Amino acid sequence: MNWTIEARQPTMTSMLAGETKPICLRRVDPARNMARFYSLALQPTLFGGTSLVRAWGRIGTRGREKIETFDGDAQADLAFVRLERTKRNRGYR
């Protein structure tokens, strides 16, 4: 048997934007000694669902990570868009 491994981009079909790509947001304010990052990505699960992978922390550190699993792509897309909007409203660019 020949086994091949395919490299896949962590993108899923989105009902809102056509395609949801991973994003990395930053918030830097030297006056407050603030340098933070927040990243979001959608990844398929082994059981046919979709996971929303979030990572955050101070720039230059590993930070923290949280994975939320959803049954459908639409639910994951809505959570992705909601979190992105929230972070952009808080000053992340």
Image: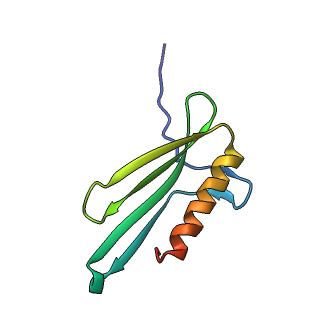
- Side (left or right) of 63 relative to 48: left
Residue at the limit of the structure toward the right, as seen here: 15
Residue 74: where, in percent of width, then height? 71, 48
Residue 19 position (above or below residue 34): above
In this rendering, the answer to whether 1 lies above or below 13 is above
Where's residue 30, x and y in %?
A: 28, 83
User: At which x and y percent is residue 80?
Assistant: 59, 56
- Tell me where residue 44 sits by quadrant: top right
In the rendered picture of this protein, how many numbered marks are placed on residues? Answer: 0
At 26% from the left and 79% from the top, the residue drawn is: 33
Depth check, front residue: 62 or 14: 62
Q: Residue furthest top?
A: 1
Colouring used for the render? rainbow
Q: Residue 15, image x and y in percent?
A: 74, 54
Classify 43 as above or below 87: above
Residue 72 located left or right of residue 31: right
Which residue is at 48% across, 40% downward?
7
